[in-house]
Image (spheres, grey):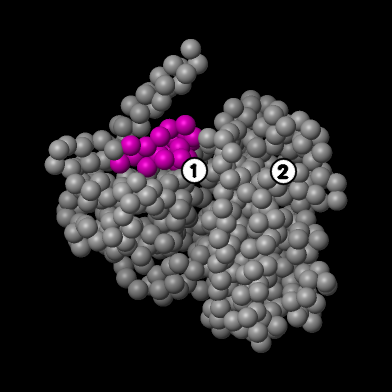
Amino acid sequence: MYIGIDLGTSGVKAVLVDGAQEVLASRTEGLTVSRPHPGWSEQDPEDWWRAVLRCFAALREAEPVAFAAVRGIGLSGQQHGAVLLGEGGRVLRPCILWNDLRSGAECAEIERRFPRSREVCANIAMPGFTAPKLLWVAEHEPAVFAAVRHVLLPKAWVRYRLTGEMIEDMSDASGTLWLDVGARRWSDEALAVCGLSEAAMPVLCEGTDPAGRVVRDLASEWGWREPPVLAGSAGDNAAGAVGIGAIAPGSAFLSLGTSGVLWVTTDRLRLGTRSAIHAFCHAIPQTWHQMGVTLSAAASLVWWSRVTGVDEAALLEELPERIERPSEAIFLPYLSGERTPHNDPEIRGGFLGLSQDTTRAALTQAVLEGVAFSFRDALDGLRESGSVLTEADVIGGGSRSARWVRILSAVLDLPLHRLKHGERGGSFGAARLARMAVTGEAPAVVCGAPERVETVLPDPVLREAYAAVLPRYRALYPAVRGLVAKEDAGAEE
């Protein structure tokens, strides 16, 4: 028996999985995000820990015999967050999360101080990453920075609470801007830019490695005679890839969650910084991946639901069952800035092309299309960097919408596969990593692909129609960027 824990931004999900890879029980505990200033995003790590304990209690109550037989635990986590620890492992301040935007100036400073940053760390410095957050703390909270003894990512902190050990896997470490991604080791040069050394970092391991055991006191409390092994585990996207078997070079998936990810597995490091493509280590040894990221994917529909006061499912039901033509409106999904291809935390979204005849349904369709165009930007960036995508699986909550998947297939001009278990997410992949850490089985043995329940092929007519709209969508970014720049200049005067 194995437990997979996914530490997300909005909640912690845990699954109990048996030897046949059947999910016996699951539990999700919600989390809240603190936004003390515009653009800030923080959480108290203790809230994560309390949520993990509640998940354990629920799994134990649902399946007491299976829970007692747990041999391994895997972790999946929201990436990039900065958990700052002082003497004795004391948390010094709330964790600054992946979607926090405060450190834009520090990104430029990192690349000024370390001109080889993009080559070594394989990514553009972005506010989401961990390193700029530390520079911000050093500048704005110097007393806190002076007290820092260790820096952990969110899931590594949960591991620390479970095992007493500070260990991190390669996939999550890739999102810090401190890892030499090609060599799979901490970069002394990158750390020095932030006034840190390897002594402040967790020990590195592969996602399939055993990486600590639950401390005896906790194991006894939860009825485990033999303390379970913790897997090296994975960042959330890498765990999702393990969960759907995207472990061989060329395997691809599109994650339509709160944020959006277009992923391709690679057998070596491929850089794509010109288009703000991320290049990270995979959780599988000697494997890497690239991904394009849009910050507001399903979050765009959630926002539109909140604005209209209409449930998301009801909004989608207002659309034709089969989308036959593009909406008259265009939506820019830059509600939280954008990563691929713009790397622009300040850009903001909007609707264009509205008329007296524009309906709510037309705007809902435009939201779906705007997110799809953002994924097309990611696809073109991946191809520009040398990755070849000929098809992709679709996962995440948005994959439930047949309309949205049809739009995506036409915009991307790719066959897209909907999966039987397309919403299992990182927790299931984490459980698979736990199994490999315990048994030593090869990834190819454990990480099979789930059943595909539908393949959506690009509709030729819709594909051509969207191809005509795409240049208009792309022309809007520089126009809106210019308006944002004028607003910024006006605020400074």
Residue at the spot of label 2: 93
* Disc with the residue nearer the chain's start (2 vs 1): 2
Residue pictured at 85% horizontal, 51% vertical: 88
Main secondary-structure element of the magenta-colored stretch: loop
Give the side of residue 213 with respect to residue 418, left or right. Answer: right
Which residue is at a point 71% across and 78% down the rendered structure image? 71
> Quick check: 361 above or below 405?
above
Q: Does the magenta run of residues contain 334?
A: yes
**How many C-alpha atoms fall within 10 Å of the one at disc 1: few (<14), some, or many (≥20)?**
many
Q: Residue furthest front?
A: 309
> Residue 293: x, y in percent?
47, 47
- Mark number, residue 277: 1
Q: Is residue 8 above or below residue 300?
A: below
Which span is picked out in magenta?
331-350
- Which amino acid, mark 2? Arg
Residue 484 located within the stretch drawn in magenta: no
Going by the image, does 275 lie left or right of 476?
right
Residue 21 placed where, x, y %?
55, 79
Question: Quick one: 103 or 306, which is closer to the camera?
Answer: 306
Which residue does the image show at 78% across and 75% down from the upper left?
221
